[in-house]
Image (cartoon, rainbow, N blue to C red):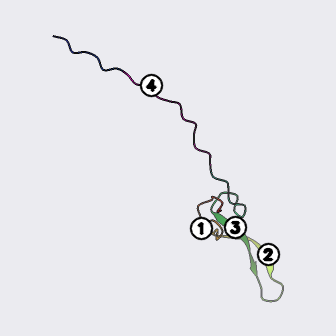
Amino acid sequence: MPTAKKPTTRRRNTPPAPEPAKCPDCDGKGETRETVRVGARKGRVTDDHQTALCLTCWGTGHATD
């Protein structure tokens, strides 16, 4: 004897969750970049850069409330 088919359920289309706002200090990258300066008196600017963790969002890239 054949078995009866189970009734199918309809899936609802749920909208995607909104993305959190980007951090204004690091533009959503999670780290900041600063120019390296050398010399005690004049502080000459070099072509080198230093990156560090963004202290506003702690590296997540999302704005805090």
Contact between labelled residues 1 and 3, with CB atoms less than 8 Å apart: no
5 falls in the magenta region: no
Q: Residue 17: give x, y in percent of width and height.
A: 58, 44
Q: Tell me: residue 47, above or below residue 2.
A: below
Of mark 4 and mark 3, the one earlier in the sequence is 4
Q: Nearer the viewer, residue 23 or 65?
A: 65
Contact between labelled residues 1 and 4, with CB atoms less than 8 Å apart: no
Q: Residues within 10 Å of mark 3 (few under 14, many from 20)?
A: few
C-alpha gap between disc 4 and disc 2? 63 Å
Q: Residue at x 82, y 89 (%)?
A: 41
Q: Residues within 10 Å of mark 2 (few under 14, many from 20)?
A: few
Residue assigned mark 2 = 45
| Amino acid type assigned to the residue bearing label 4 in the image | Arg
Q: From the image, give the main secondary structure of the stretch colored magenta.
A: loop
Please give the range of residues in magenta: 8-19
Residue 10: which numbered mark, if any?
4
Q: Quadrant of residue 8?
A: top left
Residue assigned mark 1 = 58
C-alpha gap between disc 2 and disc 1? 27 Å
**Residue 11 falls left or right of residue 39:** left
Q: Tell me: residue 28, above or below residue 16.
A: below
Of mark 3 and mark 1, the one earlier in the sequence is 3
